[in-house]
Image (cartoon, rainbow, N blue to C red):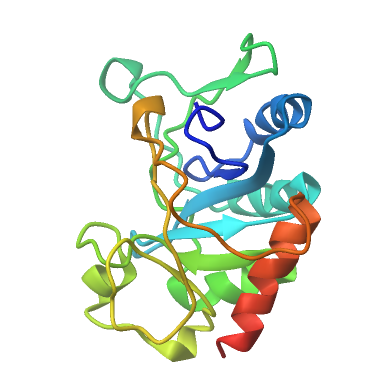
Amino acid sequence: MALIKGLNVIALSDHNTGKNCPAAMAVGRKNGLVVLPAMELTTAEDIHILCLFEKYECLEMLETYIQKMRLRVKNKPEIFGRQLILDEKDEIIGEEENLLIVSSGVSVEEVAALVAGFGGIAVPAHIDKQANGLVGVLGAFDCNLGFRMIESTLDSGVNLPRLTNSDAHYLWDIAEAEHFIEADSCSAHGVFAALKRMCEEGK
């Protein structure tokens, strides 16, 4: 669907896990689509933070870290749906039994430095929305939290580089190719380097 929509780069960011990234990245490589490994982390304050990485191994280290702290609440598939882990052939290879949309146990004060320590970029997600957005939860954007980039659909008034994405939970929600960033190459390395450059220039 991403290719049909004309995209050449996407990030797969499930809530508090990156276990489906390897399959998506493998399929992307076969079909000419760059897939950045990512996670939409839920902080202790119920704020969603997009965690972007160049390499899956770095995302995996973050997930290992938060698995020790994440709330243990059994998933109810009849309410929330099954939390499947798939391979590149769309075959089920596992299932997450604990609910993923709960707090990771990481506070908003520590998440930017934590993600950077694993080689990633932490981006407050959909800050223009009341639910689970940094501004909606805290009431204001605090530059001392260490974030160097934000994600929003509307202009939030925060003077930092801004990403706009579709935050698609279903295939039909994937947006058309209307937003872009300038990168030296259409590769995970090139795109991630461009994102880091945006963060540095926007300080």
Residue 16, position in %: x, y?
51, 45
Q: Residue at x 52, y 32 (%)?
A: 2
Q: Classify residue 110 by image quadrant.
A: bottom right
Q: Is residue 170 shown left or right of residue 149?
A: left
Residue 191, position in %: x, y?
70, 58
Residue closer to the observer: 181 or 135 = 181
Residue 86, position in %: x, y?
62, 18
Q: Is residue 132 shown left or right of residue 82?
A: left
Q: Residue at x 34, y 65 (%)?
A: 45
Quarter of the image for the C terminus: give it: bottom right
Q: How many marks?
A: 0
* In the depicted structure, whether residue 55 falls above or below residue 87: below
* In the depicted structure, whether residue 89 falls above or below residue 40: above
Residue closer to the observer: 54 or 39 = 54
Residue 9, position in %: x, y?
62, 45
Residue closer to the observer: 146 or 191 = 191
Q: Residue at x 57, y 73 (%)?
A: 112
Q: Is residue 200 shown left or right of residue 202?
A: right
Q: Is residue 145 visible?
A: yes
